[in-house]
Amino acid sequence: MPAELIVPDWPAPANVRALATTRQGGVGAGPYASLNLADHVGDDPAAVAENRRRLRRHLPAEPVWLTQVHGARCVDAATAAPGTAADAAFARSPGVVCAVLAADCLPLLLCDTAGTTVAAAHAGWRGLAAGVIESTVAALHLPGERLVAWLGPAIGADRFEVGAEVREAFLAHDPQAARAFVARPEGKWLCDIYLLARQRLADLGVCRIASADFCTVRDAQQFFSYRRDGATGRMASLIWLD
C-alpha cells in the first residue's frame, strides 16, 4: 500500500478491507494539492477524476460517493445511487465499497466480528448530535457487542473550538458529554469529537474501538483541513468486504 494511504490498525476480520487517504499522491494544485477526492469544493473536475482513478486501483469497485449533508441518514451502498443525500452507508456483499469524505469531520468505519457487514459514517459535530452513529448501527441490525469501530483522521481536541450551543446540544443528549468539552475564554469551548464518538458507541454497546493519534488541523503535510484553510480538498475513508 502506498505511503499516502492509511491502513487502519484495528481488530477487524481478515476479509474486511479498509483504508483512508491523506492529501498526498494526487494531481491537484493550490489549496487542493494533491489528492482531493471531492467534486463539490471548487477543484478542477479533471483533477478530481484523475485522483479518483488513482484511488480506484486499490479498490474492488468504484466507491458509492454520497452527497453528505451533516445528517444522520444511512443507506445501503449496494442499492444507493451515486450522489444520494446521506452521511453513512453499509454493505453486506463482497466488493461493495462504502466511502465518506472529510476534512476535519470524523470518519467512522464499522464492521462486525464475523466479517459479514461493514459501514462508513461521516460524523462531524452536527451529524454526531443528529445521531448518525446510532442510525448506522441500527442499519446493521447487529448488537453493539459484535461490532468493531475505527475512528479516522479528524480535528484534534486542542484545535476544535466551538460555541456554547454545540456543547448544549450534546449535554441535552447525555450529561456525560461534558467530559468532552474544556472551557475557553469568551464563552467558547474546546471539543473532543473523538471522545463524543466513543461515548455514543459505548452507549450502543460498541466497546472495540480503535483510532490513531490524528489531527487534521495540526498536520498540514498529511491532511486537508477546512478549519485551517477554508478552501481545501477532502480525504476519503473507505471499507468493503473481500
Image (tube, helix red, strand yellow):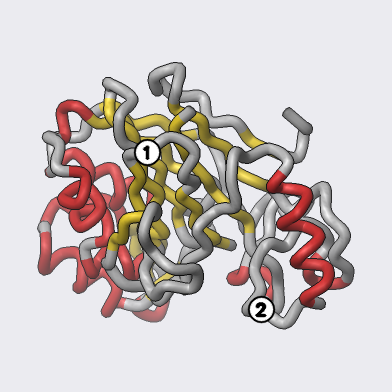
Amino acid at pointer 2:
Val
Q: Is residue 184 left or right of residue 95?
A: left
> Tag 2, which secondary structure?
loop
Residue on which the image places disc 1: 93
Residue in the image at 52% along x and 63% along y = 65
Instruction: Give the Cα separation between the discs numbered 2 and 1.
Output: 31 Å
How would you rate the neighbour count of disc 2 (Cα within 10 Å): few for under 14, some for 14-19, many for 20 or more? some
Q: Earlier in the sequence, mark 2 or mark 1?
A: 2
Determine the residue positioned at 81% across, 77% down: 44
Residue 54: x and y, percent? Answer: 78, 49
Looking at the image, residue 14 lies above or below residue 224: above
SS label for mark 1: loop
Q: Quadrant of residue 7?
A: top right
Do we see residue 232 in this rendering?
Answer: yes
Viewer-proximal residue among 228 and 206: 206
Give the answer, above or below, for where 229 lies relative to 174. below
Does residue 192 appear in this view?
Answer: no
Percent of width and height locating residue 169: 20, 72
Tag 2–tag 1 contact (CB < 8 Å) = no
The label shown at residue 187 is none
